[in-house]
């Protein structure tokens, strides 16, 4: 193992072909329903219809002005320069200046308005997406990787935003410029037009050859960049583990491998895409030469004027730009639509089912919990809980014990109605959970979980999360009861100390105490405790135990217990194995029974003694 880790790192040089094949395999997701997604984007865009029409109008003006400029130059040559009409020429130059001023203004306005439309559109979409995420049921989040969801809310959204900012205008203006240019050229000289457009097939073929490669390579580059970023993030947050297991060298080697992949993909992507302007330049010059030659011959024979040749030369330049832009924008557009589709996918997910019509609000809970022949499975073909029945009287402490995967958390998931049982009923105070409003049910519950989640903000705000209307003195009282007051007061700013989102700066035990204070403030009728597994120093552990005892007093409490010495006073201990309730009773009864629980107890004792 160690040898493998220490093995000198060797770059795996990959050929261009390998990169292309790998990229083809990891094809960036194209939108499955392109038109449907575009329609949805349009729905959002059309909230700003008036501004959008204004933008399109400005694009129309700027495209018309771009066509008019060269046309006026041609006219100046034919009508005034050749005939020596200085006054006319000056007038025309003024006109030309006006054309370019209008052109610049319209460009400026369209860009400004479009940015505003794009930002407002994405703002609305982002708001709706976030609001929708808050209404989605827990199973949705359990099934998905959070990083991937994050990427949809941030990256995909950003992609849509930047495409709306630039591509919409570019695509419309490119099409208009193309159509306008060809129209005017045909009007002036069909033959020269034919010669000018001859360059198109060469351009299309050349671009196709290049973009086929660059498209794949850019995807590969993005993929490698994503992997590299993910790896960096992982290694930064896992520094402690890396150092304790002395894995630094292996991490560096793996990084180098990923970095090399990115370098190679980036190198080829940039090299190929660098061909595009060179090809365009070459074809432009070629077309210039052909127009000059054929135009010259036509002019000598009196078919066209010198001005027309100048117009054609200018137009032929204008002509290739929109083609090039269209080719480029099309790719961006495709990936933005695919991104938007991923966003809309989430938006079309069903929200947590609305409460049944007759569901009621409970003012106060007594705390009698009954699991009545409950069965449950997360996926169709597996059984997690089968025919589980038990009853908890008000104020009782129920400990759930069993090996990992036995179904302890699942029972809590059912009790808090994050999931519904597939068979049987869960009753609270005699009412089936499905007949109680979810918000009402959860407002009577508080959780103190293994991994107490802290939010970025002051300690005071974090405790107040339990009851937002609590006053400062109530917050402090709760902290006192939770044995948290003394450590909080020792922090640099006391209750106003700002905590980072990851809880950096306070210990695992202190986090637990804060979570207990939070629950204390919430003053719930039903309490769920998921006991911390990580080792906490003895002093803090005693503090936690004391605080929990105060918290649990008079409330029905469910404790997921990992260390059995903490649940000896529980009123009932439910021993689960493979989703079955195999033993129940209090500690003394179960020890006397000398069954599964007693064995667990013995093995933990042995562990403690040997540890
Ligand atoms: N969201 C889920 N989707 C599918 N299966 C799940 C899900 N959550 C848990 N399971 C499966 O259900 C079974 C019971 O899991 P549960 O989390 O209830 O066990 P547990 O007793 O709480 O275990 P632990 O002590 O490790 O927390 C396990 O086999 C687990 O793999």
Image: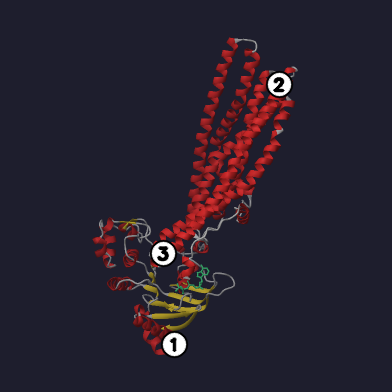
Task: Examine the rendered structure and indicate whether residue 333 appears above or below residue 549.
Answer: above
**Residue 296 image label:** 2
- Residue 485: image x %, image y %? 26, 64
Rendered view: 86 above or below 112: above
Q: Nearer the viewer, residue 608 or 109?
A: 608
Task: For the C terminus, give its image quadrant.
Answer: bottom left
Q: Nearer the viewer, residue 74 or 187?
A: 74
Q: Provide the secondary structure element on which disc 1 rests.
A: loop
Mark 1 and mark 2: span between their CA atoms? 105 Å
* Mark 1 vs mark 2: in front: 2
> How many other residues sit within 10 Å of disc 1, few (<14), some (14-19) or many (≥20)?
few
Q: Is residue 240 left or right of residue 384?
A: left
> Circles 3 and 2: CB distance less than 8 Å?
no
Residue located beneath label 1 in the image: 595
Q: Earlier in the sequence, mark 3 or mark 2?
A: 3
Q: Tell me the SS state at disc 2.
A: helix
Residue 233 locus on image (x, y percent):
44, 57
């Amino acid at each position: 193992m160690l040898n493998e880790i220490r093995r000198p790192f060797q770059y795996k040089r990959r050929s261009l072909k390998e990169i292309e094949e790998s990229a083809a395999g990891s094809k960036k997701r194209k939108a499955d329903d392109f038109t449907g997604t575009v329609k949805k984007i349009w729905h959002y865009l059309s909230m700003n219809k008036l501004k959008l029409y204004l933008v399109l109008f400005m694009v129309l003006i700027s495209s018309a002005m771009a066509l008019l400029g060269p046309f006026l130059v041609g006219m100046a040559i034919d009508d005034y320069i050749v005939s020596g009409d200085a006054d006319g020429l000056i007038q025309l130059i003024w006109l030309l200046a006006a054309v370019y001023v209008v052109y610049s203004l319209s460009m400026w306005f369209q860009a400004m308005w479009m940015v505003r439309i794009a930002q407002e559109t994405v703002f609305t979409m982002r708001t709706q997406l976030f609001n929708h995420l808050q209404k989605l049921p827990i199973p949705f989040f359990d099934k998905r990787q959070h990083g991937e969801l994050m990427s949809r809310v941030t990256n995909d959204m950003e992609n849509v935003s930047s495409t709306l900012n630039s591509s919409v205008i570019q695509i419309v203006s490119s099409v208009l410029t193309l159509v306008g240019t060809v129209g005017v050229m045909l009007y002036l000289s069909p033959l020269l037009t034919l010669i000018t457009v001859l360059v198109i097939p060469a351009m299309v073929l050349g671009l196709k050859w290049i973009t086929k490669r660059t498209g794949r390579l850019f995807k590969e580059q993005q993929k490698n960049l994503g992997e590299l970023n993910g790896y960096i993030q992982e290694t930064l947050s896992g520094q402690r583990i890396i150092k304790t297991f002395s894995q630094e060298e292996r991490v560096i080697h793996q990084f180098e491998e990923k970095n090399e992949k990115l370098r190679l993909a980036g190198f080829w992507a940039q090299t190929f895409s660098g061909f595009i302007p060179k090809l365009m330049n070459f074809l432009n010059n070629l077309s210039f030469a052909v127009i000059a030659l054929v135009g010259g011959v036509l002019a000598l024979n009196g078919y066209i004027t010198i001005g027309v040749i100048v117009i054609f030369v200018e137009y032929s330049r204008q002509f290739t730009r929109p083609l090039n832009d269209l080719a480029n924008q099309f790719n961006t557009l495709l990936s933005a639509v695919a991104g938007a589709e991923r966003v809309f996918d989430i938006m079309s997910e069903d929200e947590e089912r609305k409460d049944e019509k007759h569901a009621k609000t409970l003012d106060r809970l007594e705390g009698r919990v009954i699991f009545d022949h409950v069965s449950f499975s997360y996926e169709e073909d597996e059984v997690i809980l089968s025919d589980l029945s038990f009853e908890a009287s008000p104020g009782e402490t129920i400990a759930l014990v069993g090996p990992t995967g036995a179904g302890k958390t699942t029972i809590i998931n059912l009790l808090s109605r994050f999931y519904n049982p597939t068979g049987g009923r869960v009753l609270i105070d005699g009412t089936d959970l499905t007949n109680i409003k979810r918000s009402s049910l959860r407002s009577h519950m508080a959780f103190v979980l293994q991994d107490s989640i802290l939010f970025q903000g002051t300690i005071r705000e974090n405790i107040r999360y339990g009851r937002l209307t609590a006053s400062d003195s109530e917050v402090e009282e709760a902290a006192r009861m939770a044995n948290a007051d003394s450590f909080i007061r020792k922090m640099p700013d006391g209750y106003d100390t700002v905590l980072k989102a990851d809880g950096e700066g306070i210990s695992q035990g202190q986090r637990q105490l804060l979570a207990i204070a939070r629950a204390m403030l919430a003053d719930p009728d039903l309490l769920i405790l998921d006991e911390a597994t990580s080792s906490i120093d003895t002093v803090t552990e005693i503090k936690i135990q004391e605080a929990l005892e105060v918290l649990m007093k008079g409330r029905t409490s469910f404790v997921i217990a990992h260390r059995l010495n903490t649940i000896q006073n529980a009123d009932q201990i439910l021993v689960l194995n493979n989703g079955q309730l195999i033993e129940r009773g209090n500690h003394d009864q179960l020890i006397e029974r000398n069954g599964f629980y007693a064995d667990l107890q013995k093995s933990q004792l042995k562990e403690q003694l040997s540890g």
